[in-house]
Structures are given as structure tokens and as C-alpha cells.
Amino acid sequence: MKSLMLLWKEVAHELGDLCCTSTIRDYQTITERSKHEGLSFLTITLTDFGKDFERGLDQGKVAHDMFTGFSKHGGLPRFLGGFLEQVFDRSSGVLLDVPNIDSIFAVRQLTLMFGKILIPCSDARVKGAMVKYVECEKEVRETDEHTALGSLQSLEQILFLLFGNCLADVDISVNAGELYPKHGPGATADGLRGNAKFSQTSWPTRLEALFPYGKWAIPNSGFDYLADRVDFLEPGREIPVKVTPVPKTLKTPRIIAIEPTAMQYAQQALMAPIVDSLESRFTHNGWFSDRRNVTYGMIGFTDQVPNQDLARDGSLNGDLATLDLSEASDRVSNQHVLLLLKRHPKLSAAVQACRSTKADVQGEVIDLAKFASMGSALCFPMEAMIFLGICFLGIQDGLNHRLTRKAILDFAGKVRVYGDDIIVPKDYVHHVISRLESFGYKVNANKSFWNGKFRESCGKEFFAGENVSITRVRMEFPSSHTDDPERDSKIVSLVALRNQFYSAGLWKTANYLDGKIRKVIKHYPTVLPSSPVVGRWSYVGYDTHRLDRHTHSPQVKGFVVKSDPPASIASGEGALLKFFLKRSEEPFADVKHLERQGRPRTVNIKARWSSPF
């Protein structure tokens, strides 16, 4: 923790110089409170301070219930007071007419940079998150029971208007058998990893109608004998998804659900055509004579930049609101997905066939009313379509007349959904929130903005059109001891942190970290961002240690990341199936893919000669 506090001191000193204020007393507060509260002060208490600061920017003043736990002088906290009084009036707490952008950035950087450090939560917090997962499931079920029939019918109509053409294309592909399955790199509920996934020995009978084992899990009909080795699982014997925590913040973990291999395999086959159709400008076989995708540009899965650009525009003009949902994935009801796909029977049947219906929550198996948690390949596409549909239902309420395809096109560049990051016109924000809440979704008040000039979406934050995004510390600093299994990962993270500070203009902080890095690695050259070498970035060029004797190209001696997939042998029928499943005509990028496969479990760095650019 000491190294994190010293980093905070360096950042505070540099930002204090930038904003012409002293941070000596602020560091004293950090030191004293960390002695009593420990790491949670840096990761939780400071983060809450930063969230209150953002609320103040949005509301235009510092309310009495903000910054609890910090003494105040006038209307503002004494802590970071030199920065705060350049943003808010000291006596009244009201936002200044022309607040200092650098001070806004400084307060956010100093309070939020440790909020997402990857440190496991306490057992009590993990247990609490698991309990909350079960409670959330009960709330989804209750919402299903109490949602008015008229609301469901309205949602069905708007979803069909938005996605009828796109989903019709996918429905035809499913009916024609034009799907291509794929295994993901991650863990599975049945414990299969790497190349072992190509030799599945269990298969849910629910998949047989649309994803038959004889077509999907063996190379061709000449290998039918493999079916004799397979355990076909009836619904009561299916493997449930495994609910598990992964690091998110020290305050609470992220809860995901690890899918069984066969389910994930089929989900990947459906995800690709759904995403491709939603991100295409035109559809091929639509329900409407107009083959345009009316939601083109309003929904995305591969590019966050459009959301970020709209957030910047919203902060500058004030006409767009940015909304964030709490527990978004876990609150998407399967009933809503059934409404979405009601007029696409083959696609609906395929989605339901590969949807897991039970979850193992720390040994207790529960039935699921939600569609799927994070971990399902279909989670993001389905939730994004449902969220966009509800947003337009709210807009329709505000307009007080039924939307048409032409009217929807008028909202291009004003409405967009990426995961649970939602952007809608400010004029309709209350109607949208009301509709979201009526369907059981929770708007995160701490991360939703529409009143002031602060906006946030997809990891970028803006105030009055200015980028005030911060640099976050992701891992603890590496020690000089070589017995830490995560030492190489921490070194790579620390170098990346240094380069982010450098790119943000905090050059003194970057120089401070240079000294830290040189103590833990021997080779630390200056390189360009495109170089494979773990090195320091600079705007004034790169180092050259020698010329390659064959190409006469500059080279430097440095550490290069080497992350080998775990050993996993594929042979016989499994290797042949893997070849037939390849989606590209190009050869496999990794020549050892039959020997190693899966997500690397460790990150290693090796010294070698390589290009500095």
C-alpha cells in the first residue's frame, strides 16, 4: 500500500503545480486515514468522494449529503479544497460559471485512480455479492409477474419495428442451417479447456432439434460411431452455469456465469450472424419493403468510439443524456427475449435451446428467470436490443404518438446503446428512465448524467466538451522479489501505467515511475507505442542499440511479453473437427495450435532483441 500512497503523492504534487495549489495537507489526510482504514480508504472511500464530485458537477452544486466522512469548510470539503474551490464556490457550494477544467481532471484523477485495482474482495463482500445475485433473480421473477400486459405488447411492437428486418435475416440463416459454431478461449462449467472442447462427451438433448450432435460435434457422418461415447443429457441432468466472482473493485466483485461447453458452442454460432446483421446498414430479407436497418449506428458491439463521441457532444451541447444500468445483464428477463424473437420462430427456438436454465450459486442450484448472465455469448446482443427497444418506447411516450420507421431514422446520432451504456436525448430521459424501471431495470444514479455539462460513456468522461478521462491503476506494484507468480504481469501493468500518465501529460509522474521500473527490470529502452518491447514511450523518438544484420533495421534490447497458451493436445477426430470449424481460409496463426490452446494463465516477459517501433 505504501507504493500506492507514494504514487498518489507524486500525482497530487504535479496536479497541484498545474492548478497552482498546495497538496501537502491533502497528503497528510491520506496518510492519517490510511493508517486507520487501510487500503479501503484509497480504493473505496476516495472512489465515493469522486462519485460525489461527479454528482456535484451534474447537479451544479455540492449538496449537504455529499462527501460524508470529510470535514468541511464552508460548503466544500477541506480535503482537496484547493482544487474544489476552483470548481465550486467555497461558501455556497454552487458550480462556478467557468470552472477550471484542470481542477476537474485533478479531483477525478486523485480520487478515482485506485477504484478498479484488481485485488480480490474480502470473503464477506463476495458472499454479499452472491446473495445479491439470488435476490436479483427473485426480483426479475416478480417483475415478470407484475408487468402489465399492455406494456409487454407495446414492447413487442417496438422491438419488431426496430429489429424485424435484422432478425428475419438471422431466422432464415437458422432455418437454412447456415450457422458456424465456435469454441471460446475461456473456462467452461464442465471443466473442458483448450483443445479438449473439440472432443465433447456430453450433449444436452435440448440442442438436438437445431444443433444435432451428429452435425455439430463430429467432423462428418463418417464418424457417427463417436455418438456411442456421448452422454446425452435430459433437461433434468443438464450442467448448470457456474456462478463465480471475478475482480472488479475492492468494494464488490463482478459476478459472471460460466457456461457449459456445448451451450457456449451453440451460442457462438448464433452470436456472429446476430451481431453482423445489427451492425450492417442494409438487411437482405426483411419484413418491410424498406430493407434499411433503421437502427444502424444506434447499437454496437465492436466499437466504443461512437458512444464516446456522443458523450463528448452531450457534455458540450447538453442535449444528450448518458445512462448506466446496475446489474444490467442479470435483470434481462427471458420473457423480454421471447417477445423480441416472437415473430422469428426458428431463431427463437435456437436461442432457447442453447440458453442455460439453471445456475449453481455456491453449491445451490436455482432456476433462472433471467435470460443469461455475463458469460453467455448471447448476453450482450440480447440485452442491447432490449435496452434500445425500451429507450424508444420511452421516446414514444414523450412524443405521445406511435413511432414509425421514418421517425426512428430521425434519431440517428442521438440514440445509441453499447452494452449497458445508453445515450438518449435529454428531452426524453425521464420517459426512458420510467420505462426502464417499469420493466425491472435499475438506472445507476451515480453514473448517469443529463443535467450539467458532465457526461460519461464507455470509459471516457467529458466536461463541457473537454476530455477529463483519467488514468487508472490496475494492479499493485511489483516487488524486487522474484517468487511472486504475478510479478511479470505487474511489471507489464506498471509500464503501461507509466505510459498512460506520460500520454496524459503527467510527465513528472511518468519520470517517477521510470525510477520504480528500472529497479525491477534490467532493460528498459525508449520505444514507440507500436513496438512489441515493454518500454517507455516518448514524443522525441526511440532508442537504437544495434542494427539487424539481415535487414539493417534498428533494434533494442528489451523485454517482450510471452504468453503461451496452456498445453492441450488435439489429435484424431478432435483435431479434424477443429480444422473443419475454421472460419477463415487463411491457415491457423499459431502453428502449435494442436499442442497448445486456450487463454494463457500467466504472463511472462523475456529479454530479446526486437524493433523499437
Image (tube, grey):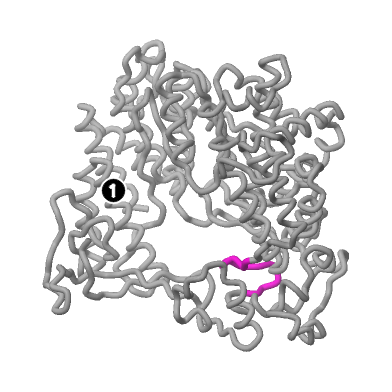
Q: Is residue 571 above or below residue 590?
A: below
Where residue 162 sits, quadrant-wise, is top right
Specify the amino acid type for callout 1: Leu
> What x and y, as percent, mark residue 164?
72, 39
Residue 188 colored in magenta in the image: yes
Where residue 485 sits, quadrant-wise, is bottom left
- 25 sits left or right of 383 in the view: left
Work out whether residue 48 or residue 358 is closer to the camera in this orientation and state it: 358
- 380 sits left or right of 171 in the view: left
Mark 1 Cα-neighbour bin, 10 Å: few <14, some 14–19, many ≥20: some
Residue for point 61% across, 19% down: 428
Residue corresponding to mark 1:
6
What secondary structure is the stretch in magenta mostly built from? loop
- 605 sits left or right of 52 in the view: left
Residue for point 33% across, 63% down: 491
Inspect this view and state whether residue 446 appears.
Answer: no
Work out whether residue 22 or residue 61 is closer to the camera in this orientation and state it: 61
Work out whether residue 594 or residue 93 is closer to the camera in this orientation and state it: 594
Numbered range of the magenta stretch: 182-192
Residue 341 colored in magenta in the image: no
Work out whether residue 591 or residue 488 is closer to the camera in this orientation and state it: 591
Inspect this view and state whether residue 360 appears.
Answer: yes
Q: Please identify the residue farthest to the front as the structure is shown.
A: 289
Residue for point 84% across, 71% down: 233
Give the position of the C terminus as an image quadrant.
bottom left
Q: Is residue 158 above or below residue 166?
A: above
> What x and y, as percent, mark residue 29?
34, 36
How many labels sit on residues? 1
Q: Is residue 36 above or below residue 483?
A: above
> What x and y, as percent, mark residue 391?
65, 29
> What x and y, as percent, mark residue 204?
81, 68
